[in-house]
Amino acid sequence: MRKLLERLFPIVVSAVTVAGFTAQVPSASQREIENVAAFARLFGVVRYFYPSDAAASLDWNRFAVYGVGRVRAAEDSVVLEATLEELFTPLGPNIEIATSLPPAAALGSVDSWLITWRYDGAGIGSPNTGPYSARRSNRGIPSSNVYRPASPPVPPSRRGDHVDIDLSPQLKARVPLSLTEEEARTGTSRLAMLRAAVDAVADPAGRADLDVWLADTLAAWNVFRHFYPYWTEADVDWDGLLAAHIANAYSARSRDAQWRALQLLVADARDGHGLVIDSGRPPLGALPVQLRIIEGELVVTATAIRDIPVGTVITAVNGVAASERIAQEMKLASGTMQWKQVLAARRIAVCERGAAVKVTFTPAMEPAQELETPCDQQQQPAEKRPDSMTEIAPGIWYVDLTRTTIEQATPILPKLASAAGIVFDLRGYPTNIGAWILPYLITAANNDNWMHIANIVGPFGRISGWQSFGWRLTPASPHFGARRVFLTDARAISYAESVMGHVADLKLATIIGSTTAGTNGNVVTFTVPSGFAIRFTGMLVTGHDGRAQHHLVGVKPDIQLEPTIAGIRAGRDELLEQALAVLRQ
């Protein structure tokens, strides 16, 4: 059932309200937060970019829990410096932690035999190598679980390559990014003691205590800091937010509260793919309605229950005002405002399976009513639309790309080729037909490079170049020469926006509706120490010119039009009506 629900509701994680999230609990001192922040800044750099054998093989989840427990107790910067040295310097040579650093030596000669970390593709990484396809040069084999076109040459490493880090107002660190073979293999008695202490830490998966919550936060913060490709577009001071997210972890006193704390962290990254998943949550179901935010109201756009008709305005759920629920859910959602609204409406309709949910609502021209309905649906009902493929008017065909498959569409290709007009409906996520239909719309090959993967060679956004590619489309027969319209809105995200990007940039049709979600690129998943899985976008997507910003912008329509409550209550599809009007002109 859970797998089914994740497929049907890929963006839904919880239907629990966030009321009480900021309840008063003992807060950490500024000293303690500063200590944890300093540890966090050094943790990510050493974990992902310090190339010693000891660092590569360390259990970093347990180390994170062990480390925050140690640094929290440091009463001043002198003790913190000593504690950080005890934690990190056993992992290999030349890691320096001090109140001030000596001038760095000039970079040495190029040496292709130096050991370094290289990350070259968004994929599912191993627990110790991060969320990107990773390799230590001259060690091991690059991960094969990610699509990678031919990589551009990576500049060879130089002796003395390093990064300097401001850990706190009082402390700095210098971490080598390249080591010789001998340096990478270095092991000491101090390393054995560190390993023994880390191995003695209980498995953090499923645990619910402060050190684990802090470890979760610093682990998640670091993955975004070093691997998220959209910091320029997001315009977020991620470094400045670290202390606030550490404070949120201090406020968490349950696994549910920690889920919300992590979701707030992901929300701050402004990534529509951003999601925190807890596989241990109770099974989820759905109310027998589909909801959307229209004209500022929570409106029923599809229903499986006679007592709550389409067009009904939901005013409260389980006694919480709809406006409050919308605000709560949007605060926890990541991405554009239009996508946050989509998520909020969907999440409000999701509930713990089997629970009774009290819904307060106002049908058209009727007083407010209240109904208790079971949370027993496996999926939310679908909006009323024409048949997925139909001649909707003489000579005009309608194809719903969210329901029609390649197998269903293939037999009607000749009819589409001879049509006078075609309406393609992409208000949502396409089936396998999305990319398949495009060759029938183009008249020349398209080799635009609009997807880009960074070759990451160091922390804090240090890259050596980009792998850039596209879909490489060639015209297919029969060509659809008819006038074409695409319907879309904020429910179109990711793959749907890849399709809409072609339509907009290649001017393949008139676009009617509202702006798409503004999030595209391969999704990366990683796991934090307590077991929460976190998703984010690991690939940079641009316009077809390779430069225009897509993230947080989306694909804008040629004709801006959104449904109205009056239209929904009248059973009208106002976007489809506009499409037919355009095609008949």
Image (cartoon, rainbow, N blue to C red):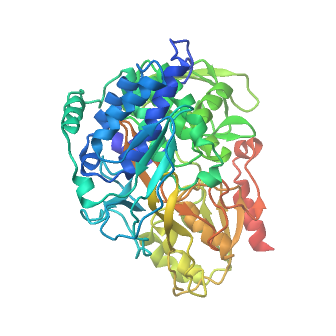
Image-based side of 27 in relation to 561, left or right: left
User: Where residue 585 sits: x, y (%)?
Assistant: 81, 74
User: Where residue 342 sits: x, y (%)?
Assistant: 61, 43
User: Where residue 430 sits: x, y (%)?
Assistant: 51, 61
User: Where residue 336 sits: x, y (%)?
Assistant: 64, 47
Q: Nearer the viewer, residue 491 or 197?
A: 197
Residue 218 visible within the image = yes
Image-based side of 299 in relation to 197, left or right: right
Query: What is the quadrant of the N terminus in the image?
Result: top left
Q: Residue at position x 49%, y 32% from top?
A: 37
Image-based side of 59 in relation to 382, left or right: left
Task: Tell me: residue 483, above or below residue 209.
Answer: below
Residue 16 visible within the image = no
Task: Tell me: residue 224, above or below residue 468.
Answer: above
Give the quadrant of residue 233: bottom right
Q: Nearer the viewer, residue 304 or 239?
A: 239
